Amino acid sequence: MKKYHLLLGGVVLGLGVILFLPRAQKEKEKEKEAFLPWFKGNTHTHTLWSDGNDFPDMVVDWYKGKGYDFLALSDHNILSRGDKWMKSAAIKSRQKTDGPSALDKYRKRFGEDLVEVRGEEGAEEVRLRTLDELRSEFEEEGRFLLIEAEEITDRFERHQVHINALNLEELIPPQKGTSVVDTMRNNLRMVREQAERLGKPIVAHLNHPNFHFSFTAEQLAEVVEEQFFEVYNGHPGINHLGDETHPGDEQLWDMANGIRIGEMKAAPLYGIATDDSHEYHGGNVSPGRGWIMVRAERLEADLLMRAVERGEFYSSSGVTLKEVSFRKGVVELEIEGQPGVTYKTQFIGTRSGDGAAAGEELDVSESLQPVYRLRGDELYVRARVTSSMDHPNPSYAGQKEQAWTQPVGWKKVISGEE
Ligand SMILES: [Zn+2]
Ligand SMILES: [Zn+2]
């Protein structure tokens, strides 16, 4: 009898270890993640390679000087490769503000020797440096990284379909399509094809959905192969807050994710904040407004992209988070507080069931360590932290500094397990 009990005990113990192990391992991995460093980067930047108004070196120098860890130059339908010369008169005409010319500033910063000019005076042209040249000039291991990117700039009728492909190596021309959704799908298919063929992660994020009010929440929901969109873009002309008849970017996010998780049992969109900077001489489409903080093992493009794919990042327009975690149904944040500044954290989610409001405020906290315990009827929960500080360089009137975390709690809903 005793022997039998011992045997049974052993079997139960063994079974317990087998059942328990994956969960324990998962927890261990999550704990390991908590010690990984955060890397700050902007994934949407324009230079003279397309319609930006400064030299790529000057733009990279700006971001590196401001302490960014990585930067993606994402010009419209072009990679920073090959021989490209630009007329200095054309450069000047892009500079809408007074003061020294972009070329003069460029020469002053990098010296006459580095700046290559050809042609007669008055009709001179300047060579734009390539990504390879910029890499050897600016990259430093563990300190600063450039990620190759393109803003695939497509449209369907009046709808602007702009998708940033990060960490690609070959140009993807706009693919066109027979509808907004079809246009999006055709471009994303090319991104996926290249990622598979080259065997590397390429992150594609849909840009500024409210630019010309190009997208509805239903369209954003439908294209489930798109995992990312811009929840904040620093360009002042992209209708971030929506208008009387159109929801703002954040409302679109909640509406689309409610449909995806609740009705389609599909993964939600993650939200990325970017600059979409074009003007570097005092204009209003300026750099430094939106970025992502990615938690990764090291500052390497593939590792960063994989971390982004796993949702190991948050977006910011000024608020810094020391910690973001989701464990055992509990969302926890730790805000890096500044003296004299207060922070409001809203836990926002959509509940299951017919008639549930998209993007309800589920709870609110003024703590620097806000916590939200899922009740069980949420399709997902995300957090938005708003600082009492006015944004130092706002893209819309009354803007405050903010941070946005990614939706969590949805895996259980779409797969039935944690
Ligand atoms: Zn765009
Ligand atoms: Zn852009």
Image (spheres, rainbow, N blue to C red):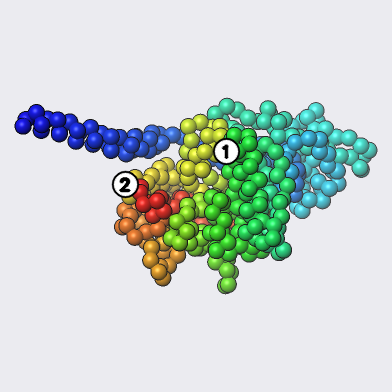
| Foreground residue among 259 and 401 | 259
Q: x and y percent of residue 29 in the render?
A: 38, 35
Q: Residue at x 75, y 46 (%)?
A: 50
Vertical relation: 6 (above or below) 337: above
- Find the distance from the CA under tag 2 to the CA under tag 1: 29 Å
- Which label number is shown at residue 328? 2
Q: Which residue appears farthest toward the right when viewing the image?
A: 120
| Foreground residue among 293 and 160 | 160
Q: Residue at x 82, y 51 (%)?
A: 93
| Foreground residue among 204 and 281 | 204
Q: Amino acid at mark 2?
A: Lys
Q: Which residue is mark 1?
A: 201
- CA neighbours of label 2 inside 10 A, class few (<14), some (14 to 19), many (20+): few
Q: x and y percent of residue 95 in the render?
A: 77, 50
Q: x and y percent of residue 221 in the render?
A: 53, 59
Vertical relation: 309 (above or below) 377: above
Vertical relation: 380 (above or below) 63: below
Closer to the eye: label 2 or 1: 1
